[in-house]
């Protein structure tokens, strides 16, 4: 046998030994390997199930919230051609309050639930339940979610109506210092200036002056001009 043939034979034997070793291990540990494969498959199935359930729950939350908004946006009177209508605004408010309350209770820890509770608070305020409105709006404001800024604004308006200006202004300052996607810093500053108009007109004027600028939106600029004319 030549050196080349011997080298090929040795390589072949080494390959054969390696293959035999792997096959021997698989044969001896077949049960263990089977369990590992099944376990890996189970993990993948579990991950898939969790992702599917999360997506399903998110879609369900949105659908439930959308159904509550359908009640909230329904027309009042008998003039509508199609869809749900309510004979009076009071009847519609009660139905809307019930719909949003159910969503808020069902999804208390989710943003859809927080948004629903915000509407519960604003509806209670419209219906004259100031104490209930304050409780719900405070809960959303303190939750720190996307709706917290909106809740603080609504709560400040409620407190201003009860002549609790210092509390209302404190909430507005919180939004100024920490604006959100739903409530900008300039919007909160404008509302704060409006609240300061009677209690601290000098600060209100200074705040309005700081808001002026070329990049300001036309709507905010008009509001600034209107409020500035009242504080002169």
Image (cartoon, grey):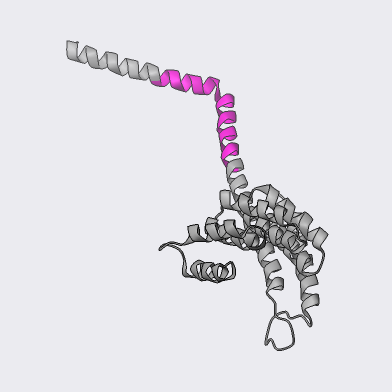
The front one of 217 and 211 is 211
- Point 59% across, 66% down: residue: 231
Q: Tell whether 4 sits left or right of 151.
A: left
Position of residue 148 relative to residue 123, above or below, is above
The front one of 227 and 89 is 227
Whether residue 110 appears in this view of the structure is no
Position of residue 75 relative to residue 177, above or below, is below
Q: Could you tell me residue 61's position as x and y percent?
A: 67, 58
Q: Tell whether 182 sits left or right of 93.
A: left
Q: Main secondary structure of the magenta part?
A: helix
- The quarter in which the N terminus is drawn is top left
- Point 81% across, 59% down: residue: 132
**Magenta run includes residue 39:** yes
Q: Could you tell me residue 168's position as x and y percent?
A: 69, 56
Q: What stretch is highlighted in magenta?
A: 19-45
Q: Could you tell me residue 121's position as x and y percent?
A: 75, 61
Q: Tell whether 184 sits left or right of 71.
A: left
């Amino acid at each position: 046998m030549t050196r080349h043939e011997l080298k090929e034979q040795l390589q072949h034997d080494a390959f054969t030994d390696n293959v035999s070793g792997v096959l021997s291990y698989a044969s001896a540990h077949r049960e263990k390997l089977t369990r590992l494969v099944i376990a890996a498959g189970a993990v993948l199935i579990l991950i898939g199930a969790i992702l599917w359930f999360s997506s399903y729950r998110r879609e369900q939350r949105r659908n439930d919230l959308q159904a509550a908004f359908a009640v909230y946006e329904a027309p009042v009177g008998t003039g509508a051609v199609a869809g749900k209508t309510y004979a009076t605004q009071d009847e519609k408010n009660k139905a809307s309050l019930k719909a949003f309350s159910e969503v808020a209770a069902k999804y208390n820890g989710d943003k859809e639930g927080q948004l629903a509770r915000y509407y519960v608070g604003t509806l209670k305020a419209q219906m004259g339940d100031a104490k209930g409105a304050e409780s719900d709006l405070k809960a959303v404001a303190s939750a720190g979610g996307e709706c917290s800024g909106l809740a603080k604004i609504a709560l400040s308006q409620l407190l201003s109506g009860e002549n609790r200006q210092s509390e209302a202004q404190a909430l507005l300052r919180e939004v100024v210092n920490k604006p959100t996607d739903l409530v900008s810093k300039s919007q909160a500053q404008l509302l704060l200036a409006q609240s300061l108009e009677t209690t601290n007109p000098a600060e209100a004027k200074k705040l309005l002056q700081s808001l002026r600028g070329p990049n300001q939106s036309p709507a905010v600029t008009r509001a600034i001009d209107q409020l500035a004319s009242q504080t002169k």
